[in-house]
């Protein structure tokens, strides 16, 4: 049973078919990676799923709810969260305050029946749990903008997790990272699969092969093939798309 489904998704830019009848599924607890050469349509697909771009045709369904016509913030409310290539942290605010804001935004009015003191404690507990989850508990007082890049990306993931997503869209989480940060991010994403299904767009093939339960290869807006790492590595057309280097390595 799929948690997330796209059916016949289409996006045209003028005469260019950037997304060509894309069918994707993500099962509960699954990490499904989307790879493809530059210009294959990965960003377009992510923007269609998160609602930043309207689809020309097709459907997007999460946990039985049709998201296709919903605005991005409504998709978040229905369980879809996205981490951006560029981090979305408030740079001048502390890590703690960034997390508190995210938890508060998610909680909405649900603490209304609590006394002020209890509500503050509940918010703080939520923020600390998120910091713990992504490994930022030791830097809560630091202004987010002063954190090294790898930690800012972890904070970005924590902000997305505050929405308690059913599906987390990770858009190149390893971009701009050195080997040590990449390893830590791989370990973090691996831990997250217990909490949420993940659609992962990533150029780092080592990370993709390590993490993904399933990989879909996008070429010219179409899904060329879908399968586990062994299937994708052994697929002759995938090898030729990647010139037999990256994927076969
Ligand atoms: N707003 C737009 N207007 C016109 N064409 C666009 C627009 N956005 C993307 N395209 C085109 O759609 C195609 C798919 O682009 P997209 O950015 O989705 O690919 P990508 O796989 O994310 O590439 P990259 O790995 O380089 O980020 C490309 O040919 C691109 O030039």
Image (cartoon, grey):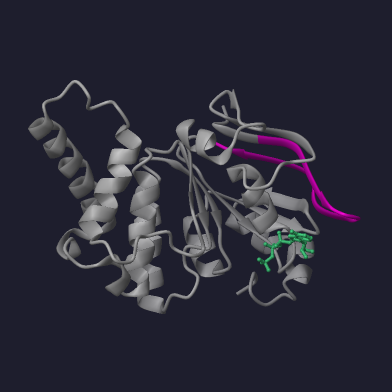
Image coords of residue 124 (percent x, y): 16, 44
Left or right: residue 176 versus residue 111 is right
174, 71: nearer the viewer: 71
Magenta segment, prevailing SS (helix, strand or loop): strand
Q: Position of residue 165 (x, y in %)?
A: 42, 38
Q: Above or below — where is 122 with respect to 96?
A: above
Dividing the picture into quarters, in which one does residue 107 lie? top left
Instruction: Name the residue at 37% across, 38% down.
Output: 164
Residue in the foreground of this view, choosing between 54 and 244: 54
Q: Which residues are magenta?
A: 6-27
Image position of 199 with respect to 89: above or below: above
- Residue at the spot x=18%, y=49% of the render? 128
Whether residue 227 appears in this view of the structure is no
Residue closest to the far top: 113
Residue 65 drawn at (x, y percent): 57, 24
Residue 78 is inside the magenta segment: no
Residue 173 x %, y %: 47, 63
Magenta run includes residue 11:
yes
At x 78%, y 70%, the residue is: 240
Image quadrant where one finds the N terminus: top right
Q: Residue at image x 36%, y 45%? A: 161
Q: Which quadrant holds the C terminus?
A: bottom right
């Amino acid at each position: 049973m799929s948690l997330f489904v796209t059916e016949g998704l289409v996006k045209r830019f003028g005469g260019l078919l950037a997304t060509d009848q894309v069918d994707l599924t993500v099962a509960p607890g699954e990490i499904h990676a989307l790879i493809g050469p530059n210009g294959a349509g990965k960003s377009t697909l992510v923007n269609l799923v998160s609602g930043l771009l309207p689809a020309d045709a097709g459907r997007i369904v999460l946990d039985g709810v049709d998201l296709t016509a919903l605005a991005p913030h409504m998709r978040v409310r229905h369980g879809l969260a996205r981490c951006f290539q560029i981090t979305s942290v408030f740079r001048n605010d502390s890590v703690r305050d960034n997390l508190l804001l995210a938890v508060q935004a998610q909680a909405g009015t649900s603490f209304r029946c609590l006394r002020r003191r209890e509500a503050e404690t509940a918010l703080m507990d939520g923020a600390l749990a998120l910091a713990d989850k992504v490994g930022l508990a030791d830097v809560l007082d630091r202004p987010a903008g002063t954190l090294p890049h790898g930690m800012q990306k972890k904070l970005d993931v924590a902000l997305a997790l505050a929405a308690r997503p059913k599906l987390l869209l990770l858009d190149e989480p390893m971009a701009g990272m050195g080997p040590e940060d990449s390893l830590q991010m791989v370990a973090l994403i691996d831990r997250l699969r217990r909490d949420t299904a993940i659609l992962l767009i990533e150029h780092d093939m080592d990370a993709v092969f390590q993490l993904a339960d399933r990989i879909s290869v996008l070429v010219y807006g179409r899904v060329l093939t879908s399968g586990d790492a062994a299937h994708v590595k052994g697929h002759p057309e995938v090898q030729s798309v990647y010139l037999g280097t990256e994927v076969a390595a």
